Image (cartoon, rainbow, N blue to C red):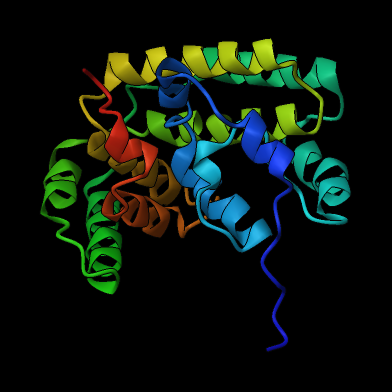
């Protein structure tokens, strides 16, 4: 009764966030983080389908003042510099320990059970994928959306960054399950709490036939 209400997204946002298939597929990059984090902000599902995110009252200013500066982003120039350098520096070859793999499998098992989802493919992926490069890719996919939505990136810059991130993803992962496991490896192995429920967001998207991660395979 006393919780924060769901945001009502103005129609112009829905009108803007209608894209061609090639651009829609790019929005799969960062989808778990976006669905998780912006779902917390708006209390709505479906944020992963958006490039331009809607911010309820006051949350836009807080994001600009407190959240983005944690990554060194304070204006348009720093947004381009930080995102560009982060993409260039991403590590696709470092591997996590067996202990991390066990923790990731435990997290996947718990989330799959919670949502009555067959997580066997994800568990199999966790047994073979030991790298953690998708952790930065997915975080950047969300940060790009945020920076565009707050007018720190142009639309052209946003799509260009997402395209670079997609190319890296296709070069290093075979499918979205492998990508998600790599993300979880990074979150667990680097001992950081990005948004731990992104795992649950991914599973909910996998259960949703209309989600972009079901609509588009990583590799055609």
Measured along the vertical axis of the image, is residue 96 above or below residue 159? below
Residue 182 seen by the camera: no
When the figure is inspected, residue 174 is found, relative to residue 154, above or below; the finding is: below
Nearer to me, 31 or 74? 31
Left or right for 3, reference 123:
right
In the rendered image, the vertical position of residue 174 relative to residue 65, given as above or below: above
Image quadrant in which you'd find residue 153: top right
Q: In this image, 97 relative to 121: left or right?
A: right
* Residue in the image at 22% along x and 30% along y: 175
| Residue 46 image position (x, y, % from top left) | 50, 49
Q: Nearer the viewer, residue 167 or 1?
A: 1
| Placement of the N terminus among the 4 image quadrants | bottom right
The residue under the point 55% across, 50% down is 194
Tell me residue 33's x, y (percent). 51, 45
Asked whether residue 21 is in view, the answer is: yes
| Viewport quadrant of the C terminus | top left
Quadrant of the rendered image containing residue 57: bottom right
| 84, above or below 44, in the image | above
């Amino acid at each position: 009764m006393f919780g924060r209400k769901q945001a009502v997204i103005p129609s112009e946002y829905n009108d803007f966030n209608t894209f061609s298939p090639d651009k829609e597929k790019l929005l799969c990059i960062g989808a778990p983080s976006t669905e998780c984090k912006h779902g917390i902000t708006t209390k709505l599902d479906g944020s992963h389908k958006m490039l331009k995110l809607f911010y309820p009252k006051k949350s836009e200013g807080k994001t600009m003042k407190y959240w983005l500066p944690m990554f060194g982003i304070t204006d348009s120039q720093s947004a381009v510099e930080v995102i560009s350098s982060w993409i260039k520096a991403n590590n696709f070859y470092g591997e996590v320990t067996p202990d991390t793999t066990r923790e990731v499998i435990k997290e996947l098992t718990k989330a799959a059970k919670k949502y009555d989802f067959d997580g066997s493919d994800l568990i199999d992926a966790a047994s073979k994928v030991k790298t953690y490069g998708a952790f930065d890719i997915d975080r950047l996919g969300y940060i790009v959306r945020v920076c565009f939505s707050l007018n720190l990136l142009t639309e052209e810059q946003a799509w260009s960054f997402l395209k670079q991130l997609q190319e890296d993803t296709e070069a290093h992962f075979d499918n979205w399950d492998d990508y998600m496991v790599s993300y979880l490896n990074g979150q667990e192995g680097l001992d950081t709490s990005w948004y731990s429920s992104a795992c649950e967001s991914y599973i909910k998207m996998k259960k949703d036939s209309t989600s972009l991660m079901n609509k588009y395979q990583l590799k055609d």
